[in-house]
Image: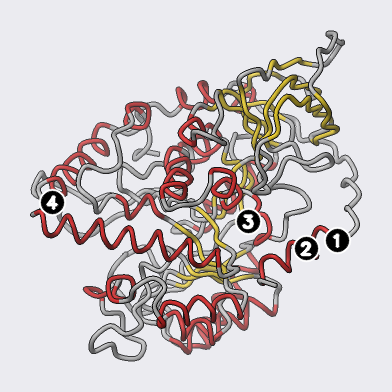
């Protein structure tokens, strides 16, 4: 039995967990109340289609009751008489899905000073925090749980989590990844640079004590530093993922890493002249460019990942931008950008549109191979996660790009229910929260999104979000988006 299938069979065989005791919900502050659709806590959604996040086909005409922040009951579709303190939501022509679990969803934006139409900018790169706009954009899209997957301002993310949890500001549940575990590099001036393995252990201990709940290794870390960090994190019951370069995927697997970011696009194994613990920046995608899906080398890597229970996070939207004239421009997404961020994105998009035909063809071929490798990984029994990596490419925007990730998984060959599962339940499984979130099931937390249309047959309908619940609190996507219009890239 495949590793993922075994894990799911054990999960299904286990007795259902009793609902957690109802904790007193935090008093919601004015900033949260301003973006709510309803202040009620009891809902009945009638005659709705459910795409439940398990990968099963959609189920038509169901009634779903929400109460006390949880899914109280699911039953056959029926007309319901109005009742005091209960909001009736007409689900006809709509689909209810579990809240998305964004597994590579940052809270910052990379800015390039004095960028011009030719792509030139002045050093240094700066990384302003998006603590206001990003949480609202995620929540507006129905992303109700986020792993920050590398922080630049660690305290800002930790304090943001506290503000969200206390009801003072709107936003998703946050798994706060500590600042990057980075080796010696001048790539980003705001990153700490590890000195050695002992320093890596100290770094993990410090940020775990501060409240970080996961860690991410970055491009220039050494094997000794990565191994020490993994051991220190595992000793505290925490996981480590990595956007690697200096360390290859087989080396990271041997060291015990839990997850690998960006699919297979940053594996440098087999890069010509690759030196131990050195990142060949100009060959960072060498594995995908060099191997053939289904070939012996690709098959061996997939088998090793599955056997060692290493997850892989798909971040297709951030790589799609290497292909000329992709993705399709989204007017709603462009409206949330500052004028400067929008201009910077269009500069970059125009430069890619001018690529020579042979370069454009290579970019598309590499992207297609990545999609195939991700599909092969799942077919081999691997746990594939999803997140867009919104880091400063103005076309990879929180929330909007989470939807695009699911669309690109369908383009890769996954069925819509399977793609939704990757973006919901799989993330919950990895985070150890599958009994609470990730699927539409009675007893689970009411983290849900209601969309117009049927994404089980037309995945683009996922973008038509009408209502979002987080812990049973009903948010208005339009109000959330309006509150950040023209702000992403500023704060």
Real-space CA distance between mark 4 and mark 1, rounded to the nearest whole angstrom? 55 Å
Q: Please state which of residues 61 and 95 is positioned toward the viewer in this rendering.
A: 61
Indicate whether 54 appears above or below 304.
above
Q: Write down the residue under mark 1.
A: 13
Q: Is residue 171 something that shows in the picture?
A: yes
Query: Pointer 4: what residue?
Result: 119
Question: Residue at horizontal 10%, vertical 54%?
Answer: 357
Nearer the observer: mark 1 or 3; the answer is 1
Counting residues from the start of the chain, the first of labels 3 and 4 encountered is 4
Element at label 4: loop
Label 1 – label 3 distance at C-alpha: 17 Å
* Mark 4 or 1: the one toward you: 1
Res 426 label:
3
Q: Looking at the rendered structure, which numbered label has been put on residue 9?
A: 2
Quadrant in the rendering for residue 270: bottom left
> In terms of sequence position, does the residue under pointer 4 or pointer 1 come before the other?
1
Residue 124 location, x and y as percent?
23, 59
The answer to which of 184 and 455 lies nearer the viewer is 455
Q: Are marks 1 and 2 in contact (CB under 8 Å)?
A: yes
Compute the Cα span from label 3 to label 4: 38 Å
- Please identify the quarter of the rendering in which residue 96 is found: top right
């Amino acid at each position: 039995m495949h590793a993922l299938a075994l894990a799911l069979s054990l999960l299904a065989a286990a007795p259902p967990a009793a609902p957690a005791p109802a904790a007193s919900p935090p008093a919601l502050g004015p900033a949260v109340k301003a973006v709510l659709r309803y202040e009620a806590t009891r809902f009945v959604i009638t005659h709705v289609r459910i795409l439940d996040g398990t990968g099963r086909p959609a189920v038509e005409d169901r009634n779903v009751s929400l109460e006390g922040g949880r899914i109280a009951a699911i039953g056959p579709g029926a007309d319901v008489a109005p009742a005091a303190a209960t909001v009736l939501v007409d689900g006809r022509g709509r689909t209810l899905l579990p809240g998305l679990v964004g597994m590579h969803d940052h809270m910052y934006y990379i800015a390039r000073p004095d960028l011009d139409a030719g792509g030139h900018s002045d050093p240094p790169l700066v990384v302003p925090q998006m603590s206001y706009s990003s949480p609202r954009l995620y929540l507006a899209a129905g992303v109700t749980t986020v792993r920050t997957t590398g922080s630049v301002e660690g305290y800002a993310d930790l304090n943001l989590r506290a503000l969200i949890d206390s009801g003072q500001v709107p936003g998703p549940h946050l798994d706060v990844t500590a600042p990057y575990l980075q080796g010696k590099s001048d790539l980003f001036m705001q990153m700490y640079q590890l000195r050695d393995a002992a320093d890596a252990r100290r770094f993990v201990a410090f940020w775990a004590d501060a409240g970080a709940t996961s860690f991410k290794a970055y491009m220039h870390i050494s094997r000794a530093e990565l191994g020490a960090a993994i051991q220190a994190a595992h000793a505290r019951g925490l996981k480590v993922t990595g956007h690697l370069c200096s360390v290859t995927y087989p080396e990271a697997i041997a060291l015990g890493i839990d997850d690998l970011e960006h699919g297979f696009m940053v594996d440098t194994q087999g890069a010509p002249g690759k030196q131990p613990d050195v990142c060949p920046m100009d060959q960072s995608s060498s594995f995908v460019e060099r191997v053939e899906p289904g070939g012996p080398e690709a098959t061996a890597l997939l088998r090793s990942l599955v056997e060692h229970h290493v997850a892989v996070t798909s971040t297709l939207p951030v790589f799609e931008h290497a292909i000329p004239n992709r993705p399709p421009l989204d007017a709603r997404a462009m409206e949330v950008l500052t004028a400067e961020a929008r201009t910077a994105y269009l500069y970059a998009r125009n430069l890619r549109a001018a690529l020579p035909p042979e370069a454009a063809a290579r970019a598309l071929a590499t992207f297609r191979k990545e999609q195939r490798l991700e599909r092969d990984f799942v077919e081999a029994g691997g746990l594939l996660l999803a997140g867009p990596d919104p880091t400063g490419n103005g076309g990879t925007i929180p929330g909007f790009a989470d939807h695009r990730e699911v669309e690109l998984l369908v383009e890769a060959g996954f069925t819509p229910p399977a793609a939704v599962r990757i973006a919901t339940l799989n993330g919950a499984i990895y985070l150890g929260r599958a009994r609470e979130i990730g699927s539409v099931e009675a007893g689970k937390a009411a983290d849900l999104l209601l969309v117009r249309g049927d994404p089980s047959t037309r995945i683009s309908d996922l973008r038509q979000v009408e209502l979002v619940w987080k812990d049973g609190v009903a948010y208005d996507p339009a109000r959330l988006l309006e509150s950040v219009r023209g702000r992403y890239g500023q704060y």
